[in-house]
Image (tube, rainbow, N blue to C red):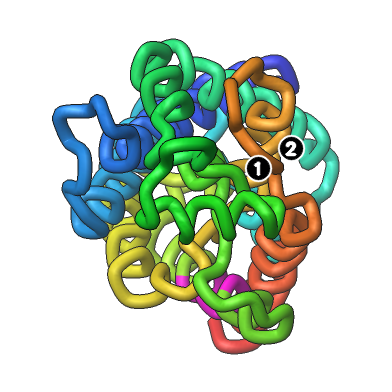
Amino acid sequence: MSSSDIFIGETLGTAILILLGGGVCAAVTLKASKARNAGWLAIAFGWGFAVMTAVYISAPLSGAHLNPAVTVALAIKNSDWSNVPYYLGGQLLGAMIGAVLVWLAYYGQFHAHLTDKEIVGGPGAQATTAKAVEAQERGAGPVLGIFSTGPEIRNVVQNLVTEIIGTIVLILAVLTQGLNNQGNGLGALGGLITAFVVVAIGLSLGGPTGYAINPARDLGPRIVHALLPLPNKGGSDWSYAWIPVVGPLIGAAIAAGIYNVAF
């Protein structure tokens, strides 16, 4: 794979990943969406199918890492860091593009949601706004969850450990079940297996933090949230933003170490 193939493949694949994954979060969250309140099952399966679709689109070009944690784990496993910058650059750019596409697809719903006093508070708002207003005061705006993750209980150690554990499960599955014959990315069957592993992580381990398990998936859309001209969008919760970046990278390194020792 050439450096340009890697960059294009990762940009395209990660954009599709975030478009479909962020899209299901928007569908469940926004008031004027037909899928409003569809629930956690919809989100978990939506992200799983997003991974599967993105993998099959980008695998022929880049091996479909789509996640800096996967890239770091493979670099450790293979002792080859030469292409890591191309992977990371494509993943971050693709995540930002995908987040912008979610905004465009749900443009009217974002405006309706963020101008509704029951959501953002203000004169005439009902008592049901208390939770949303409290979240905004902590720095997390009412639609930030469409773009990036956040904890239900803010505990730095627990939140970091949760992300580490979830990423270890993902990376071990990728390394033992998901790689193509060259060992440098996801194969056809591996993409399907990994998609269901992501669903399993979401259902079993996603409750505490929203299971980023992917630094680009969280950081890229969070940057877009900060830049988009969304009315009453609130903060982007930058005080938490390092956890879904550092946690998955630590988890990736641990998982790669386990794989090298055990297999």
Q: For numbered disc 1, what is the local secondary structure? A: helix
Task: Indicate left or right for 130 with 74 as reference.
Answer: left
Residue 219: percent from left, percent from top:
69, 43
Residue 83 higher or lower than 130, as above or below: above
Q: Which mark is residue 216?
A: 1
Q: Please state the horizontal and vertical placement of residue 149, each as a whole percent of the image.
A: 55, 54
What range of the chain is rendered magenta? 163-169
Residue farthest along the front direction in this orientation: 124
Q: CA distance from mark 1 to mark 2?
A: 8 Å
Nearer to the camera, 154 or 126? 126
- Secondary structure of the magenta portion, mostly? helix
Q: Amino acid at mark 1?
A: Ala
Q: Nearer the viewer, residue 185 or 215?
A: 215
Label 2 near label 1: C-beta < 8 Å?
yes
Residue type indicated by callout 2 = Leu
Residue at image coords 72%, 79%: 156
Residue indicated by mark 2: 88
Q: Residue at x 35, y 64 (%)?
A: 202
Q: Is residue 173 above or below residue 53?
A: below
Q: Residue at x 78, y 41 (%)?
A: 84
